[in-house]
C-alpha cells in the first residue's frame, strides 16, 4: 500500500510539472511558518497527512458514502468523494488566510486531490496509500516553499 501511495504521489508531482493547475497544489503566497525546520517537516509532512486522511477519508467520506444510508439517503460514491473533497478544499483555506483569491488555483487543486484521495481509499481499502501520497505531496510543497521563501 505504501508503495502505491509513493508512486501515486510521484505521478501527481510529475503531472504538476506538465499541467500548471496541478503544480499549484497547496502553495500559499506569502506563507510564514514560525516553526523550525524539523517542526515544519513533522507538522506538514507527517502529522497533517495522517490527521487529515483520518478525518476527511475515514470520517467525512464514510459519512457521505455509508452513514447517510441510515437516514434513507443512498449517495453515489462519486458524489460522496466530491462532497468530502469540497470540505477538504474549504479546510485548506486556512492556509490561505481564508481567502479564495489568495488561494488561486490551489483551492481547486486541493479539491481535485480530495477526490483522488477518496478513490485511493476506496480502491485500496486502506488509508495508508492516501497518507503516503499526501505526505509526498506535502513534502514537495514544503520543499518548494523553502526554496521560494527560505
Image (spheres, rainbow, N blue to C red):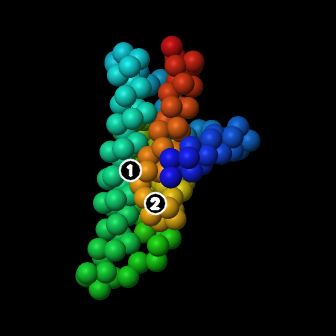
**Percent position (x, y) of residue 72?**
29, 86
Circles 1 and 2, Cβ within 8 Å, touching? The answer is yes
Residue 76 against residue 8 in the figure, above or below:
below
Which disc number belongs to residue 53? 1
Identify the residue at horizontal 35%, vertical 31% (top origin): 43
Quarter where residue 125 is shown: bottom left
Residue 87 against residue 135 in the figure, above or below:
below
Quarter where residue 46 is shown: top left
Is residue 115 something one can see in this rendering? no
In the displayed structure image, the side of residue 142 where residue 49 appears, left or right: left
| Farthest left residue in view | 71
Residue 58 against residue 43 in the figure, above or below:
below
Residue 93 against residue 70 in the figure, above or below:
above
In the displayed structure image, the side of residue 112 where residue 40 appears, left or right: left
Q: Secondary structure at mark 2?
A: helix
Is residue 25 something one can see in this rendering? yes
How dense is the environment of label 2, judged by Cα within 10 Å: few (below 14), some, or many (20 and up)?
Answer: some
How dense is the environment of label 1, judged by Cα within 10 Å: few (below 14), some, or many (20 and up)?
Answer: many
Q: Which residue is mark 2?
A: 121
Quarter where residue 126 is shown: bottom left
**Percent position (x, y) of residue 2?**
50, 47
Q: Secondary structure at mark 1?
A: helix
Identify the residue at horizontal 32%, vertical 45% (top origin): 51
| Farthest bottom residue in view | 72
Q: What's the CA distance linking mark 1 and mark 2?
A: 9 Å
Q: Earlier in the sequence, mark 1 or mark 2?
A: 1
Identify the residue at horizontal 26%, vertical 81% (top origin): 70
Which disc number belongs to residue 114? none
Amino acid at each position: 500500500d505504501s508503495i502505491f501511495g509513493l508512486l501515486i504521489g510521484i505521478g501527481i508531482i510529475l503531472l504538476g510539472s506538465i499541467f500548471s493547475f496541478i503544480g499549484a497544489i497547496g502553495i500559499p503566497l506569502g506563507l510564514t511558518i514560525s516553526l523550525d525546520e524539523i517542526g515544519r517537516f513533522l507538522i506538514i509532512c507527517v502529522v497533517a497527512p495522517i490527521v487529515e486522511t483520518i478525518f476527511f477519508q475515514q470520517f467525512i467520506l464514510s459519512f457521505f458514502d455509508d452513514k447517510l444510508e441510515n437516514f434513507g439517503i443512498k449517495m453515489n460514491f462519486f458524489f460522496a468523494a466530491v462532497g468530502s473533497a469540497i470540505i477538504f478544499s474549504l479546510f485548506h483555506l486556512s492556509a490561505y488566510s481564508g481567502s479564495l483569491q489568495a488561494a488561486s488555483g490551489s483551492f481547486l487543486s486541493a479539491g481535485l486531490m480530495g477526490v483522488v484521495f477518496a478513490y485511493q481509499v476506496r480502491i485500496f481499502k486502506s488509508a495508508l496509500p492516501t497518507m503516503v501520497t499526501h505526505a509526498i505531496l506535502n513534502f514537495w510543497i514544503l520543499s518548494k516553499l523553502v526554496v521560494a521563501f527560505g
